[in-house]
Image (spheres, rainbow, N blue to C red):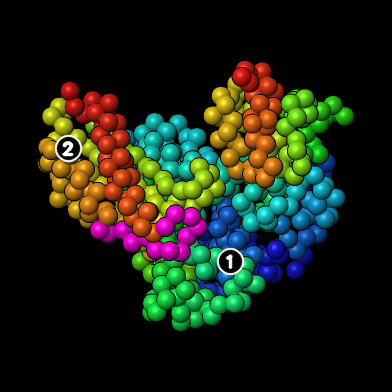
Amino acid sequence: MKKTITLHVNGDVYELSVEPNETLLDVLREELALTGTKKGCDSGACGACTVIVDGEPILSCMTLAVRCQYKEITTIEGLAQDGVLHPLQKSAIERGAVQCGFCTPGWLLSAKILLENNPAPTREEVRTAIAGNICRCTGYKRIEEAILAAAGQNTE
Amino acid sequence: MKVPGFEYAEPESISECCKLLEEQGVNARAIAGGTNLMMTLKNRLKVPKMLVDLFCLPELNQIRYSEEEGLNVGALVSLRHLAANAVVRGKYPILARAALDVGSPQIQAMGTIGGNLCQDTCCLYYNRPPMWRQGLEPCHKLGGDVCHAIPGSKTCWATYCGDLAPVLLVLRARIGVADSKGEKVIPLSELYSGDGKAPLTLQPGQVVKEVQVPGPSAHSGGAYLKLRVRKTVDYPLLGVAVTLALEGAHGILKDVKVALTGVEKAPLLIEAADELKGEKDTDKVIERLAEAAYKQAHPINNTYGLTPKYRRDMVRVYVRSAVHRSMEAAIKKGGVA
């Protein structure tokens, strides 16, 4: 039986009718057309579907949309504000931290949470923070550097 | 992978939650963080008609501490919040460590302490999508009567792979279990049946409500070491938790506890540990514990990566190292002059 829920996504309020078995990932992509959130393994192991829900980095493929009633959700589409890229996005472009791009939305959101809680992370802390975001191009070094640079840290 | 359809229930109280689960029996499952259950559903390993949402019970999402009672963690506290809690970090550092060793940061943000303890056993032949399983006869855990991990076995050998259970066992944790009639407190060890097919002793309608951990003793130290192929995401292929306490200034062993995960159908508390109380010879303590753990561990060929032989050999190595580190931590706290 469908259930009506209210989601707050990137500052917009959506009222949606969803089946209890729909994942947040499918609702974001299929209902709201927010396809920046990627479907990778769809089994909780790759982090491509990472979004921020009430300040926590979560896997939208492992989350039932029906459980997100009234939650504040940030997807990659909500990172840039008024057409101005987030410092992490700028840094990713400047440092060439994007290869195929599939893991990028996920790690950018993981990094956003990291910098909110720890504005001056060490390289090790950066690695730990993005440990749940698998990059199959294996371009981790540039990703680390982009995050460190966005935090104003030495990237050498 | 679509999750099979189900009815979604939002109980308003823990008693309503237990009552629903009791009435529905095997047709209903409780859902907390969902990191374990969602894959069970996606892989159609279980197809419940109803999911009862424990997140409707925010009273189970609290951490309390007092000198007399020790630590009390509600079952729905996320691993991320558990690891970030100042009391947990200060007084129970191995619990914080183990929480940060679970899965990935996202899994830690979603997964809960209660859910982690109630994690189902895993097997290479069971935790697979339906299409993959089509080529094999249904195993014991799927309701059949064969075991693909140990051919010929009359029982299921699925392995318990939770990270928090060994740590909470050595910390002497007890759990509050609620049902429709009320609640009871039992030692954590009684949560585990030792049956790979049905690893928990909980009956339909019973829910883990909280975890109680006594206050740490003076001059004590601990360690949790996890063996896995990658430093992230993976379940433990072996996990060793140790706590020990030293007597005064002479380094005499007052108490030691060792528990393993990833090498049996339930988390394993090493039995020899109690006989070593009062022992002065550190090397003897370490060797006796390493041997006892080696004997009790039975890793089998049902996990990704690393052979059972290697994992069993590493039991000795990891126990030695974890006891060593625990002693160092205890000495640092003033256990030995």
Q: Residue A129: x percent and y percent?
A: 59, 35
User: Helix or strand or loop: what does disc 2 sit on?
Assistant: helix
Main SS category, magenta section: loop
Check if mark 2's residue and mark 1's residue have beta carbons within 8 Å.
Answer: no
**Protein chain holding label 2:** B
In the image, A142 versus A114, the foreground residue is A142
Q: Residue A105: x percent and y percent?
A: 74, 40
Hey, which quadrant is residue B149 in on the image? bottom left
Q: Is residue B333 shown left or right of residue B33?
A: left
Magenta highlight range: B295-307
Q: Amino acid at mark 2?
A: Thr
Whether the magenta-drawn stretch holds residue B75 is answered as no
In the rendered structure, find residue B128 and report the number of the disc placed on it: 1
Residue B217 appearing in the image: no
Q: Is residue A8 shown left or right of residue B85?
A: right
Residue identifier under label 2:
B282
Which residue shows up at 78% across the image and 55% down it? A27
